[in-house]
Image: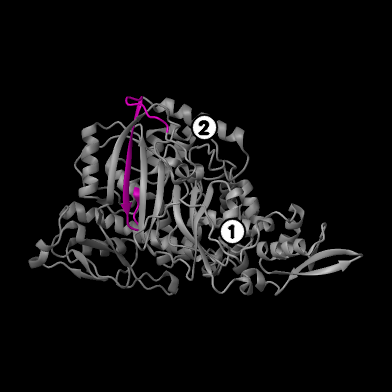
Amino acid sequence: METVEMNSVSLKRPHDEDDVANADEIKRQKISEKSKTGNDSGQSVETVTEQPDKSLLEDTKNEIIPNEESEEQEDEELEDIDEDGDPESFADMMKHGLTESDVGITKFVSSHKGFSGILKERYSDFVVHEIGKDGRVSHLDDFSVPVDDEDPSEETFTVLSDEDKQRLEELQLLKNKETSVAIEVIEDTKEKRTVIHQAVKSLFPGLETKTEDRDGKKYIVAYHAAGKKALANPRKHSWPKSRGSYCHFVLYKENKDTMDAINVLSKFLRVKPNIFSYMGTKDKRAITVQEIAVLRITAQRLAHLNKCLMNFKLGNFSYKNHPLKLGELQGNHFTVVLRNITGTDDQIEQAMHSLREIGFINYYGMQRFGTTAVPTYQIGRAILQNNWNEVMDLILKPRPGAEKGYLVKCREEWAKTKDPAAALKKLPVKRCVEGQLLRGLLKYGMKNIISAFGIIPRNNRLMYIHSYQSYVWNNMVSKRIEEYGLRAVPGDLTLKGATAVHIEEGDVDNYTIHDVVMPLPGFDVIYPKHKIGEAYKEMLVADNLDINNMRHKIRDYSLSGAYRKIIIRPQNVSWEVVAYDDPKIPLFSTDLDKLEGKPLPVLPTDGKFRALKMEFSLPPSTYATMAIREVLKMDTSIKNQTQLNTTWLR
């Protein structure tokens, strides 16, 4: 799965002179945010008030489960509970979190002296543009809708009242016992009736309509054409044969992850989330631009959402005959601003030249391992060991560190009673992993933990074992670089096409460190023929695992393994240092700024602060924060940053 790692952290060395000023500014922004809106989706994209990312307190792998709308609504209302708190206490809690060295991230490839900077002081300081499989970078630069004679009129979107839409949605989603909804035609003309028919059918897939006379009045009656099946599949017969079945569009989003965005779009369109497809997931705390495809939803309907959605914009519409597939992308292009930098011009030049010419160690970033005292790789290790009591205990037991209050109460209840029903009562947010496991235990009983664990969505379950693979890989790569440095050596692995082969003594001069790959452990990989091959075996033996038997009795948890380059050299690297006075002003234009004709603020030539604006492209499954770590020579873990600077959350 493609991952773009974008944790929100303040990369500062201790005692920077501007710590207090920056903390006060963030505090003012936060107060302003609370006073301006109670809307859980934040400000509109035109007037976004930015604040520190408190989603770090959440399990970032939780996902919305379709068909649990009442629970989703409760969960959304509870998202903001327990998020505010004393920053010192947060720092104390994060003492139980992970540092980079805990997950094997210990080496650098460059020789320059590190310097300080703030990453994501504003989420708009981190912009990601997806690069498609054809090498084209996704941009939002066109709001126009393809002209199509088959499209309904604009009146379709306004002819129904809010009350009508509410009743139709309840009918569509089978939320009440009504078998039909009757809408009175106030101004009875054939044209008006036609528009209402079109509005119901296009806005509420699965419903059919007919006209009835009742007491001398005309009514449009909506009803289910095919029961529950109609909701799952958009109406095929209403889609023109000449038009591609999939509407592709560019999604520009701010401060929302991809799955949240898909769920919001599906709610507004009243369709299932699974009719959307995409090439890669983009994380929350950033501005991201990516291509999305949706089955049999018109560009006209999608464009209409631009009038009512906050933090999203949709554009660059086209119809095609195929969906998008995960992984079908070349990578992502990043535009990153590091504010309040302390490095000299020479330091910055050395750091950026090294990034461009040598690159960075392709570590799995901190997001891969979770933010609490129980790292995800520990749960993955227990799964691979077939130790299901340990899996259950690691997920549900009380843990020190930063967590929401209701999770703490749930864990305490579990420790006291081992009663899934009692623990669930303490947990108002049901879609989290803990809630899903407890519901599984309630359904299957304490003696069938495997089935109970299986209730958790498959991607979330696999995340744990992939985290363990990543943990092993990070540690082994650090050992490899410690032992042999930045050159290819006999016994290393390289790829010939998709096949890994060992580098032989007589051939070693034909390879550089950029050719070397290392395996994620599994049953279908080979290992280096030098000391590091033995180190893999020793690490797995210490974890009670057999490197020669990575098949699991449950097929989902069998690891085939894979290969990963140990050094990544970013492409299209550029940078500039800019001066600024106001920490709130943007330092570059986004796609939306350009579309709306917003000019960039005039920057001073000699401002109070300096920022490093950098751009680079990375392949899929690489972590941008690991590139930034190489530039700054700083630990990117939340634990380290909160200990260095507890003011970042104020």
Magenta-highlighted residues: 601-624
Q: Amino acid at mark 2?
A: Gln
Instruction: From the viewer's side, name the closer residue of 201 and 433.
Output: 201
**In magenta stretch: residue 621:** yes
The residue where tag 1 is placed is: 300
Instruction: From the viewer's side, name the closer residue of 267 and 53.
Output: 267
- Tell me the element at label 2: helix
Seen at 48% across and 71% down, the residue is 321
Q: How is the image coloured?
A: one colour
Find residue 162 and report its horizontal and vertical position in percent.
74, 52
Find residue 331 and report its horizontal and vertical position in percent.
35, 57
Find residue 460 and report its horizontal and vertical position in percent.
48, 61
**In magenta stretch: residue 607:** yes
Instruction: From the viewer's side, name the closer residue of 643 and 138.
Output: 138
The residue where tag 2 is placed is: 29
Find residue 387 and report its horizontal and vertical position in percent.
44, 65
Q: Quadrant of the N terminus?
A: bottom left
Question: Residue lying farthest right?
Answer: 215
10 Å neighbourhood of mark 2: few (<14), some, or many (≥20)? some
Q: Nearer the viewer, mark 1 or mark 2?
A: 1
Seen at 60% across and 71% down, the residue is 239
Using the rendered view, name the quadrant where residue 556 is placed.
Answer: bottom left
User: Is residue 190 found left or right of 395 in the rendered image?
Assistant: right
